[in-house]
Image (spheres, rainbow, N blue to C red):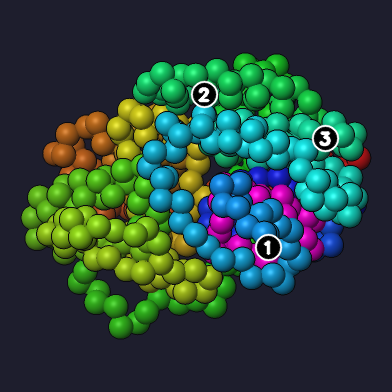
C-alpha cells in the first residue's frame, strides 16, 4: 500500500501539524508514504516518508533556470525561508489562490511525473484555508482514479469571522472547495469531537475525530530535577505565541501578581521570534523567556514544571479560528502527571475538552480576576489538584494512545482500498 499525503506542512517531530501527521501514520512503513507539501519548513522530518515533493510560493514567484519546483528524496536537506507576510495571510489568501491558478500548478508536468513514480493507492489530504491545495488534490484524485480521505485541523468555514470584503470573497470560494473535496472523499476526519459534530451535520457525511496522539511511555525514565526550589511554583508554557497567546500569558501573569505571598513564576518555551517590546513586557510581568525545546529535552522540561499552561485568546477573531481546534500539546500535558491550567474562553474546543472532563484548573478569561484568583488558591490548597491530575492521566491513556489510534486509522484506509 502506498499513501500520498497532501498537506501544507510536511512531516515533523516539532511543528504541530507535522507531529500530528507522524502520530497518525506511525503504523505505516517509510516506503508506504510519499508527501506533497506547499511550505518551506526547516523542521521537516526527512526520514519519515520515502519521497517528498515540495512546491512553494517562492518557487512560483522566483524564476530560476536551475530549479523552480523540485522533488526530493528523504535525504535531501531543504532550506528554510520565512514568508514574512504571515500576519496578513487572511487578506492575501485570495491572491495566493490566483497565483497558483495562474501558474496552473495542478497540471505541472514534474509533479505528475513524480506522482506516477510513486504509484499511490490512496490520497490523504489535510485541508486548509487555500483553495489551490483543494484543486491540486482533486486533480490528482480524479486523474489517477484514487480514493481519498480529508482531514481538517482548523476550521475556516463555520466559526471564522470575515473582517473585510477580501475575506468574505475568499470564504465563498473556500466553502465551495470544501463541499467538493468532502463529497469526493471516502473518509472524513476532524481534530475534535466538536468539529466532527458540526461538519457531519452540515455536510451530511460522517466525520471521525482524530488528533495528535502520543506514546504512553513518553515520560518513562524521566524524573523531576531534584535541585528545583521547593518553595516556588513554576508555570510553564510550551508553543507558539501567535493568535495573541502572548497577550493572554501577560494577562495571566498580572492576575497571579495579585495573589498574596505570590511565589509563582511563568516560563515560556517558544520558537516564536519576539520583538523587544514583547520581551520587555514579559520581563516586567515576571515571565521568563526560554528557547524552544524538543524531543527528550521537551519531555524533561514538561516534567520539571509544576503547572502546565494552555491558553487561547478571547479576541473575537482569534477565538473564531480556534473554536473547533484542539491543541496538539494537550495529550502530552495529560500524561505528565502535572497540573494543567487552562486560561481563555471556555467555548473553544481545547478548553471545553479540559473543562467537560474535569482535567484541568479552568480560568475563564471572561470572568473577573477576583473569581479566577479564588479558583487558583482553592485548587492549589486542596485535594482538587490531585484529582485533576489523576483524571488527566487516565483520560490521556484512554483517548490518546498513538498505537491504538494509528492501527485503527490504518485499518480504515485498508478497508477503503
At 89% from the left and 55% from the top, the residue drawn is 117
At 44% from the left and 24% from the top, the residue drawn is 167
Q: Within 10 Å of the Cα at label 1, are there few (<14), some (14-19), or many (20+) other Cα atoms?
A: few
Per the image, the residue denoted by label 3 is 141
Residue 250 x, y percent position in the rendering = 21, 50
Residue 362's disc number: none
- Quadrant location of residue 177? top right
Single out the mark in the foreground, 2 or 1.
1
15 lies above or below 86:
below
For marks 2 and 3 on the same chain, the one whose residue lies earlier in the sequence: 3
**Is 31 included in the stretch rendered in magenta?**
no
Residue 309 x, y percent position in the rendering = 35, 53
- Quadrant location of residue 304? bottom left
At 55% from the left and 18% from the top, the residue drawn is 172
Q: Is residue 206 left or right of residue 186?
A: left
**Which secondary structure, mark 2?**
helix
Q: Is residue 245 left or right of residue 333?
A: left
Q: Is residue 117 left or right of residue 386?
A: right
> Does the image show residue 79?
yes
At 36% from the left and 29% from the top, the residue drawn is 317
Q: Within 10 Å of the Cα at label 2, are there few (<14), some (14-19), or many (20+) other Cα atoms?
A: many
Magenta stretch in the rendered image: 33-58
- Quadrant location of residue 68? bottom right
Q: Are marks 2 and 3 in contact (CB under 8 Å)?
A: no
**Which secondary structure, mark 1?**
loop
**Is 48 included in the stretch rendered in magenta?**
yes
Per the image, the residue denoted by label 2 is 170
Q: Is residue 31 left or right of residue 355?
A: right
Residue 139 x, y percent position in the rendering = 79, 33
Per the image, the residue denoted by label 1 is 66
Amino acid at each position: 500500500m502506498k499513501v500520498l499525503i497532501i498537506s501544507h506542512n510536511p512531516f515533523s517531530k516539532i511543528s504541530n501539524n507535522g507531529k500530528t501527521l507522524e502520530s497518525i501514520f506511525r503504523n505505516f512503513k517509510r516506503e508506504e508514504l510519499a508527501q506533497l507539501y506547499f511550505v518551506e519548513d526547516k523542521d521537516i522530518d526527512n526520514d519519515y516518508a520515502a519521497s517528498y515533493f515540495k512546491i512553494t510560493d517562492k518557487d512560483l514567484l522566483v524564476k530560476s533556470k536551475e530549479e523552480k519546483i523540485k522533488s526530493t528524496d528523504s535525504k535531501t536537506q531543504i532550506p528554510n525561508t520565512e514568508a514574512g507576510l504571515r500576519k496578513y495571510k487572511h487578506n492575501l489568501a485570495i491572491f495566493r489562490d490566483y497565483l497558483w491558478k495562474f501558474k496552473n500548478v495542478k497540471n505541472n508536468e514534474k509533479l505528475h511525473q513524480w506522482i506516477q513514480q510513486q504509484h499511490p493507492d490512496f490520497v490523504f489530504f489535510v485541508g486548509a484555508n487555500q483553495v489551490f491545495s483543494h484543486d491540486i488534490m482533486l486533480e490528482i484524485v480524479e486523474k489517477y482514479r484514487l480514493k481519498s480521505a480529508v482531514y481538517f485541523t482548523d476550521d475556516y468555514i463555520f466559526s471564522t469571522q470575515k473582517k473585510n470584503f477580501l475575506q468574505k470573497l475568499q470564504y465563498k470560494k473556500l466553502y465551495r472547495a470544501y463541499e467538493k473535496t468532502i463529497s469526493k472523499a471516502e473518509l472524513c476526519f476532524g481534530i475534535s469531537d466538536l468539529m466532527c459534530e458540526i461538519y457531519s451535520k452540515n455536510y451530511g457525511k460522517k466525520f471521525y475525530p482524530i488528533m495528535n496522539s502520543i506514546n504512553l511511555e513518553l515520560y518513562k525514565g524521566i524524573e523531576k530535577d531534584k535541585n528545583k526550589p521547593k518553595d516556588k511554583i513554576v508555570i510553564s508554557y510550551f508553543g507558539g505565541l501567535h493568535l495573541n497567546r502572548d497577550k493572554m500569558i501577560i494577562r495571566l501573569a498580572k492576575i497571579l501578581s495579585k495573589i498574596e505571598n505570590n511565589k509563582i513564576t511563568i516560563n515560556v518555551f517558544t520558537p516564536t521570534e519576539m520583538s523587544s517590546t514583547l520581551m520587555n513586557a514579559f520581563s516586567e510581568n515576571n515571565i521568563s523567556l526560554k528557547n524552544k525545546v524538543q524531543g527528550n529535552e521537551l519531555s524533561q522540561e514538561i516534567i520539571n514544571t509544576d503547572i502546565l499552561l494552555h491558553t487561547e485568546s478571547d479576541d473575537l477573531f482569534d477565538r473564531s479560528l480556534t473554536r473547533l481546534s484542539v491543541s496538539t500539546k494537550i495529550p502530552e500535558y495529560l500524561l505528565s502527571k502535572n497540573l494543567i491550567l487552562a486560561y481563555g474562553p471556555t467555548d473553544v474546543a481545547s478548553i471545553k475538552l479540559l473543562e467537560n472532563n474535569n482535567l484541568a484548573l479552568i480560568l475563564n478569561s471572561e470572568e473577573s480576576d477576583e473569581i479566577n484568583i479564588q479558583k487558583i488558591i482553592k485548587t492549589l490548597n486542596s485535594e482538587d489538584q490531585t484529582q485533576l491530575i489523576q483524571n488527566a492521566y487516565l483520560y490521556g491513556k484512554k483517548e490518546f494512545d498513538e498505537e491504538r489510534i494509528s492501527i485503527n486509522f490504518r485499518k480504515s484506509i485498508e478497508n477503503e482500498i
